[in-house]
Image (tube, coloured by chain):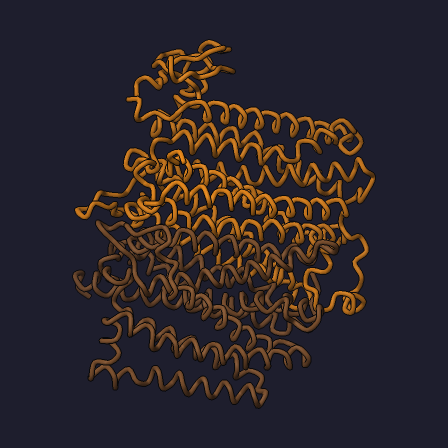
Chain colours: A brown, B orange
Amino acid sequence: MTPDLLPIILPLVWALILALAVFLYVLLGGYDLGLGVLFPLAPTHQDRDAMMGSVSPFWDGNETWLVMGGGGLLAAFPLAYSVMLPALYLPIILMLIGLILRGVAFEFRFKSERYRWIWDLAFTGGSILAALMQGVVIGAFVQGFKVVDNKFVGGTFDWLTPFSVVTALAVVSGYVLLSAGWLIMKGDEALRDWAYDVGRVALIAVTVFIAIFSVWTPLTHPEIAARWFSPGNMVMLSPVPLLTAATVIALWVSLGRRWRYLPFLLAIVIFLMCYTGLAVSLFPYIIPPSVTLWQAAAAPESQLFMLYGAIPILPIILGYTAYSYYVFWDATEHEGYH
Amino acid sequence: MPELDPVLLSRIQFAFTISFHILFPSFTIGLAAWLLVLEALWLKTGQPVYLQLSEQWTKIFAVSFGMGVVSGVVLSYEFGTNWSELSRLGGNVIGPLLSYEVLTAFFLEAGFLGIMLFGHERVPKAVHAFATAMVALGTLISAFWILSANSWMQTPDGQVMGADGVLHVDNWWKVIFNPSFPYRFTHMVAAAYLTTAFIVGGIGAWYIVRDQSVPHGRVMLGMALSLLVWLAPLQVVIGDLSGLNAREYQPAKIAALEAHWDTERGAPLILFAWPDTKTESNKYQIAVPKLGSLVLTHEWDGEIRGLKSFPPEDRPNPIIPFFAFRIMVGVGLIMIALSTIGAVLWLMGRLYTTRWFLKAMMWASPLGFVAVLAGWFTAEVGRQPWVVYGLLRTVDAISPVPGGKVLTSIILFVLVYGIVFGAGVYYIARLVRRGPDETPPLPEEEESDRSRRPMAAAG
């Protein structure tokens, strides 16, 4: 490869790696946060213990993908990191506060008797706060940032719009859907019964939100409308909405027929489709609507240096993460702290 | 509303959140290594005392590690929320170092933590020991990268200023193994082991004094002392090398932490003073002649540059570095004294019966945390006004955020960390007070009791 190709290819490779990290976080952190949202609604307190037990061995690993997303953005696209984080100051701080409260709840909840309700509250409140703020971040990201001279120049509350409020609610309902799928795989029979019902409600909500965004986003963003509805693209991109619709129907059927593993997998497919839709809408901008992947990219020598490590290490990480999931596959059934 | 200075507020916020965070790695780096040793001893000797200690301290590890994780995630985002210009201008250099920390350390820790904490009945013993080893290794790798990034900011090397106005890396080896890195990395790892050893030894001493779990207390105190007796003195040597290095690369920091205003040969060692930045001199000074030059340069008439030889805008304010450094050194001397006395008592066969010493060790338990915080305050305030030494000033590294926003987040962090820290310390203290479970039931018996409650045994 000639050296002048590197500055073109490396940002694409890193965008793919970061997209993978963020997607893994959305799935793993998603079911994890969703459990926190559902926590107070669970039928019995044994169910709550089982829900918490099913994710205790994993929450730290799940959250590491979020750190990878943040750290990777700083490393691969420092300009994007340095523009968007100040712009999203309050939602990011609130998300971190939420993650702290729910994270320590895993350690503290089983250690307290009288004040367990405080940590239940911290787990649920923290999870809802973190999920809402992640949704706000996505909404604000789609709407774009005011950038002059490589710095964010917008206002303190630019991120707070009707659009970002709706994306926040959409993300919460999506996480609840994932978490229902998780419980259908992991729970005992009574818990599964409840999770199937939750899954149906969440699926209806998710479908409504997908419909809202499919109309709202192109209406308010002409460039996104052009991307999807220009004659050539319309045919080429049609699999995205068609597959989404098919998956929604398949998920509804699988919930009705009480399938055990398919609901979680189909929920993942729905997330993947939305994620693809988002990527199609915004590519090649990493700070919408003005800064591209290439403009925000770190120097090629920095991206290359990281790639040397990431290529061998990422598969190893996926390997031992999979091993840990295998070891604790039935963690809700019986668990001993040793 | 008066004008809120976002630079000062962001510095306060970063100091608060990172000081809170560093307490946990300082403890868990050593604790993970100790748990590995305990597990190895148990596998080798089969003596239940090692298993029982390992079970008790694994629970303490879980709480501390969890608090370290959640407070660490905050830091990885603060570089953007509060120090975005540092991220933009230095991202090419520090970004990859921090990413390597995530890739090689955080995932390793997180991937094997579940097995280490909950996996005893699910995986073979050897796999469990391997998981513990990976978590312990992860804590060290994490320290490696974070000290590399921090040391590069203290003594930058291997970078060039690009035509695009941001820093570029010219030589990764020089960036990672920058001039102060070897000393500061070993200094921090040794500090972490000392911190854990004082906690473990002090609590062991407490068990002996309370006549509770005495065999466990003896193992704890004995293992702690066999580390302390050589590591506490060695830490002084490492610290001295680190000081010589700082004198070469960050002379203004040395001038500040010693409160030397004038450049002189045969400088005194100032034991106490109040450095006055207005008059550029010390008040109430108590000093030993010539000793300062001997300590800092290893020569009686070695030259020490004074603060006045730096332009005022390039000087750190000496007050915090001066006092923080003295606290750190004082704690270090107490550590050496206690370790030496302990070793002598041990040789005389009176270690476990000398009550005044056991009580002294008890009260000395938290000393490592004091030294770690004091040391970091010396290092971080002493390198001001630079965030990347000589290249980027702290005032120029700030995000475009108004002070009011930063004040809001400080208040939130103080409130939440206060609650979380209070609860964490309370639960750890309870695990300590309860002591090791000396009659672990057989796995069959605990099944019903602990079913579906992964952390119930800690409750």
Q: Residue at x 68, y 71 (%)?
A: A47
Q: Quadrant of residue B178?
A: top left
Q: Is residue B301 above or below residue A165?
A: above
The quarter of the rendered structure image containing the C terminus of chain B is bottom right
In this rendering, position of residue B124 left or right of residue B15:
right
Name the residue nearer the viewer: B130 or A286.
A286
Q: Is residue A250 above or below residue A307?
A: below
Q: Residue at x 39, y 36 (%)?
A: B4
Q: Tell which residue pokes out farthest to the front in this image.
A: B1
Q: Is residue B58 above or below residue A143?
A: above
Horizontal and vertical percent for residue B68?
55, 49
Name the residue nearer the viewer: A212 or A259.
A212
In this rendering, position of residue B357 left or right of residue A76:
right
Q: Quadrant of residue A332?
A: bottom right
Horizontal and vertical percent for residue B370?
57, 33
In this rendering, position of residue A69 left or right of residue A184:
left
Q: Residue at x 50, y 27 (%)?
A: B324
Q: How many marks?
A: 0
